Image (cartoon, rainbow, N blue to C red):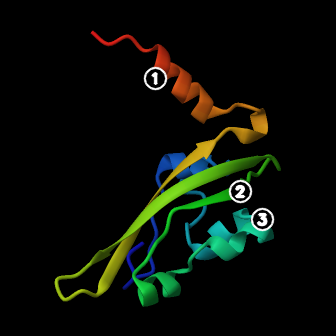
Amino acid sequence: MTFSTQEQSWSPGLFRIPGLEAGAVRPDDELMLSLVPSDDRAVLEGSAEIVRTSLLGDRAVRITRRDATMRLVMSRGGVFHSADGEPVRSRRDAVAALRAAGIDVFRMAGEAVATAKVG
């Protein structure tokens, strides 16, 4: 997010997590909050809080997809500052676990690493 314009941009992959078509909706804080169950909303920072604290923490929240299934999304973020130390923009990277489908992608990744042949 660019703080001066409040403009957010989402990757095509981030649009796919909740089952949205890239470009069909304008990404913003309100849209993101509408996708997160109320139980999980308290852990998410809004734009004003990020500017005030200059912090954007690592989070795990559930996302409700358009088809009513849930995805567990882990995200890691950071705040970028101007030369005079003012927060200018933030970036958050997200990874969705296919929890609703019963697929443990982290276990699968661990198994893949354990069985990979080096050489």
Mark 1, Cα crowd under 10 Å, few <14 / some 14-19 / many 20+, is few
Residue 80 image offset from top left, x and y in percent: 30, 73
Residue 99 in the figure: left or right of residue 26: right
Real-space Cα separation, disc 2 to disc 3, in angstroms: 7 Å
Q: CA distance from mark 1 to mark 3?
A: 33 Å
Total marks in image: 3
- Residue ID for mark 1: 113
Distance Cα–Cα, label 1 vs label 2: 26 Å
Disc 2 on helix, strand or loop? strand
What amino acid type should be assigned to the residue bearing mark 3?
Pro
Residue visible at 16% across and 83% down? 83
Q: Earlier in the sequence, mark 2 or mark 3?
A: 3
Q: What is the x, y in percent for residue 32?
A: 63, 67
Q: Mark 3 packing: few (<14 Cα in 10 Å), some, or many (20+)?
A: some
Q: Dots 2 and 3: beta carbons under 8 Å?
A: yes
Mark 3 residue element = loop
Report whether residue 20 is seen. Answer: no
Residue 26 sits in which quadrant?
bottom right
- Relative to 89, say whether 91 is above or below: above
Outermost residue, left direction?
Answer: 83
Label 1 vs 2, first from the N-terminus: 2
Mark 1 and 3 residues: CB-CB less than 8 Å, in contact? Answer: no
Label of residue 37 in the image: 3
Tag 1: amino acid: Val
1 or 3: mark nearer the eye: 1
* Label 2 Cα crowd, 10 Å radius (few <14 / some 14-19 / many 20+): many
Q: Are marks 1 and 2 in contact (CB under 8 Å)?
A: no
